[in-house]
Amino acid sequence: MFTVESLLVVTVVMPLAAAVLTALVGPRLLRSQSHWPTILALAISLTASLLLVWQVTQEAAATLSARENQPVPSAERREHPLGYERIVTLWTWSGGGLPEHGAGSAQQEEDPLGPPPIIEVSLRADPLTAIMLATVTVISLLVAIYSVGYMHGDPGYWRFYSYIALFVFSMCMLVSVSNFLLLYVFWEAVGLCSYLLIGFWYQRPAAAAAGKKAFLVNRVGDFGFALGVFLLWMSYGTLNFHDVQTAGQTQPGILGQTFLQQPEHYVGGAVGTAIALLLMAGACGKSAQWPLHVWLPDAMEGPTPVSALIHAATMVTAGVYLTARCLPLFLAAPVAPLVVACIGGGTALLAALIALTQTDLKRILAYSTISQLGYMFLAVGTGTVLGVTAGMFHLFTHAFFKALLFLAAGSVMHAMGGVIDLRQFGGLRRHLPWTHTTMLFGCLALAGVVPFAGFWSKDAILLAVGQQEGMVYQVLGWTATATAFLTAFYTFRAFFLCFYGPERIPEEAGDHVHEGPAWMIGPLVVLAAGSLVVGAYFEWTHGFAHFLGQTPSLCLTGLAQEGPRAEMISHSTVAVGSSLVALAGIGLAGLVYLGPRSLLEGLTRTSSAVGLYGLSYGKFFFDEIYQAVVVQPFWALARLCGWLDDRAIDGAVDGIGTLPRGLGALFRSLQMGFTPFYALAMILGVLVLLGALMTG
Amino acid sequence: MNPQQVVFLTTIILGTAGLVLLLRPGGGTMRLLGAGFAAIAFGAVLAQAPMIQPAWEGVLLYLLAAMTVLAALAAVSLVHPLYCAVCFGLTLVGVSALMAYGGAQFLAAGTLIVYVGAILVVLLFVLMLAHPRGRAAYDWNRWEVFVSAGTGMVFLAMLSLLLTRSLAGPVQWAAQAEAHRQQAAGAEAHADSLLPEKTYLPPKAGQGVLAEQHVARIGQHLFGGHWWAVQAAGVLLLAALVGAAVIIGRLRGPLEGPQQAANPPASAFAPPQPDRSEVQRNS
Amino acid sequence: MNDYAFLHQYLAVGAMLFSIGLVGFFTRRNMILMFLCTEMMLQGVSLSLVGWSRFYDDFGGQMLVIMILAVAACEAAIGLALIVVLFRHTGSLDIAVWQRLREANQPPWQDDRPIPIPEEPPPSWPRLAPAGVRPVESPETTDFREMV
């Protein structure tokens, strides 16, 4: 019963059922109980996905041992697939299954476009998908439970849960489809859910504007992604990930065994680079990397659980997933991995610098998310198994502690009556003990302090980057280390400002500042526990890397396991170094924000004098630059077009419209309402026709 | 100027002058003059056609045509509507005589019965019902006599020119073929070969409209190939019956005389705004 | 030859009837007479159709004339009913009364011409003789009185 196929389908379908059910009966029947379908469905999904991980682990191990026990000559390598993957074909969308028109093969006409493309709606189960599904369902279940307390009493309660379930469905499909076309479909679907949830409180202009901004910025990236898919189609003639067997022939998929075993057949050169960079553009849009990072901070206008689920833990990692999944395509292009690493490292540093001075708690976390996503891209950009595994590991752990941080921030916001500005409150640790403790766990994990999850994954990334040769990777490694320091600093800046120092409570919070209900505290505790243990557990058991290494894309023939400088960089060196850096950041934050006030003022004054403070506080003025460079020209163009439409086109149309009116005015006086005159006019017309007939 | 152009101009000028004189309110002399002009014009049109052989048939046809056209002129131009109707009846008689002569005996009878027997009588009923006094301003003063008569006569002249032009050639060729046929009996094929290809030849065998048992065969046609058309005409007649009943049925209440003078003053030609109570009483 | 002559004659007479009906339709303002003029035009067309029918020796033309007869009967029924209704609205058969469909600023066509109805001579009544004297009566007069 618990086969891989059935578990996969159950995992994916349950959220869809919940979304449809909630949308149908939510507004009338369920009302304030609208969370039950979603929570139950997500619980089932979570169970199924955990079972799926277990099942995949077993089968992958069996496959691996079978291959190792029976070493085969390379000529017969095809018999033994690389990695582990199971394809579940639900139905065939196009091609393949079409009935043959001709009765005999003699009548088959040669289609000039080649054989019809086979597009199957097929899901895949492999370690990467299993990990992503488990992450998504865990976080989404916890967020859904948390939202029961957080969203209580909202007029759009059922709508919220319907959207959440729809999002989880889209995300699960996104990570489990085995086709670029369907990947694009669900790529857009999660974007749609993101738009709907950012603009959930659409009555607020800021929320509506943020939703629009997210949608439009994502469009830029998605356009690149679409172009990349077109190029893939042009280059490979298929969009499937896996090989498809039709009529005894194998149609090789882009990420299928055929190509993986002969990676030299991947399209390289300019086209390959273009494909990789266009896919990277899509990933940048979805994962909020420079230069398309501007939408994510604004997306914090949505409800905080949405920020935790979509804009921190799951959806924004879709770009990392895509890059990891398409690693062979990136490796086929010479410079693509380097570009990915540079964008990731640069974004990590940039976002960390911006986060230093922000005063909105959720925005700090948003920039922190961008920064951490940059880390993941940096890791994937190394192009080694170690790097990709580290990136996915960081994705996994980051999902826990960033969801935790957002939910804790939501808890603070809940207690403060919706105020999230760090300047307006402080010293809350006595009022919010649970939130304080759990958020401390999250902050330690984010800062990368020893036993917590972030430490292990960030370490792995630093290690993977450090193993790479070349000047650029060296610089990126130092950048990452500096970012780790900044991360620790800004994380604990926010933490100290929020929970320590003199007690300040804004008016909106009212008299009785209190913790949220158990619905909210429970997920916080679970996530805090997760932040504490998941990193250490997987690091010590080495389960994560082994498991993920069975993904077909990461079994690419000739793919480096580790960087070239593996011998020179030891794990412990990096660990000690990053720990010291993190502790230094925390210590500096404590010194500045808990120590004498003059130090903070002096620091602020100094940095303001050289302009750094304003630069950071103004988010490096990316919004203003885009406004001036992109938005304003488009506005001008739109106004020009509007003017043209209003004056030239409408004028022409109106002119054409007035022509018959003018002509009609000439003959209007003939309308005298006198019947014989009409008859006379008719006969005069007949006369003209008759005369033309006779003379012509 | 060839004869065609002469007839064309004659028809237009004399016909217009005659019709104007006829239609304008005026004395008897002027009307007679007009009738003469018009007769010349119409005669010129008719004279374009070749004479029908034998001659007595041609003359008979001319007489019938003259009677029909003159009666039509009278029906259009006389002042008193009753006289007009009577003259229209005379026109109908002439038309049905022409029809009978042209191989349409059934239609001739039908025209007489339907038009003279039904339509014209209904016409007279309505005339007497609606117009008992017989003399109204609108019977005397006509609308734009000159323009109307000119238009009508130009129309006639063009039709006539069209006829003459299109039939002149075939008539000539037919005459030549006839001459050949008389010269060499039995050389019909050769005679017909003189005709240009585009000439529309009438069928030779007399199995058509002029053959015996005319009415029986018209019945065959009517209820054979044109059965659906006959049914449609029947439905149309029924619909007209119902429609007329509905229209007249709106006139409830006692039949009254006209609410206004049947002979309104000349200055009251603007459309009257009907009094609301009056309308309600009427409907 | 005769066929062509016949066709020409009939078409000419038909054209004349049509033209006369046309002119009548233009000039006459009495609605009943306008109606009559349309019937006259229909007669012209019917006559031409009969001519063609004879020329081609085919019944098609006559079938069409029969249809025209049916349509004319319908037309008479509806048209005369309408005319009666219109007459009862205004008490006049003048087509110039009904000019409401003209353009907004267009003045209606008006007839300002005097009505040239000739003056009827005053009626002559029998003249009574002065009382007391028995008039000398002619036998003509006595006969008249007996008739009265």
Image (tube, coloured by chain):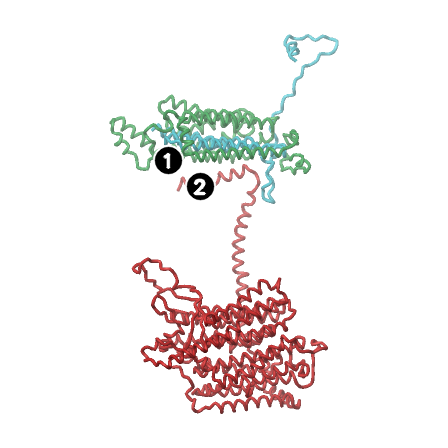
The answer to whether any part of residue A513 appears in the image is yes
The answer to whether any part of residue A343 appears in the image is no
- Say which residue label 2 marks: A689
**Viewer-nearest residue: A685 or A14:** A14
A628 sits to left or right of A59: right
Disc 2 marks a residue whose amino acid type is Leu
What is chain B's hue in the picture? green
Q: SS class of the residue under badge 2?
A: helix
Disc 1 marks a residue whose amino acid type is Ser
Please state, as top left, top right, bottom left or bottom right, where the C terminus of chain A lies in the image: top left
- Residue B95: which quarter of the image? top left
What is chain C's hue in the picture? cyan
Label 2 environment density (alpha carbons within 10 Å; few <14, some 14–19, many ≥20): few
Which residue is painted at 63% across and 65% down in the image?
A: A31
Kindly identify which chain the residue marked by label 1 belongs to. B
Q: SS class of the residue under badge 1?
A: helix
* Image: A569 above or below A20: below
Q: Which x, y percent locates residue C12?
A: 42, 30
Q: Tell if the residue under mark 1 belongs to the same chain as the one under mark 2.
A: no
Label 1 environment density (alpha carbons within 10 Å; few <14, some 14–19, many ≥20): few
Furthest toward the right, the residue is C132
Q: Which x, y percent locates residue A171?
A: 51, 71
Q: Which x, y percent locates residue B20?
A: 52, 31
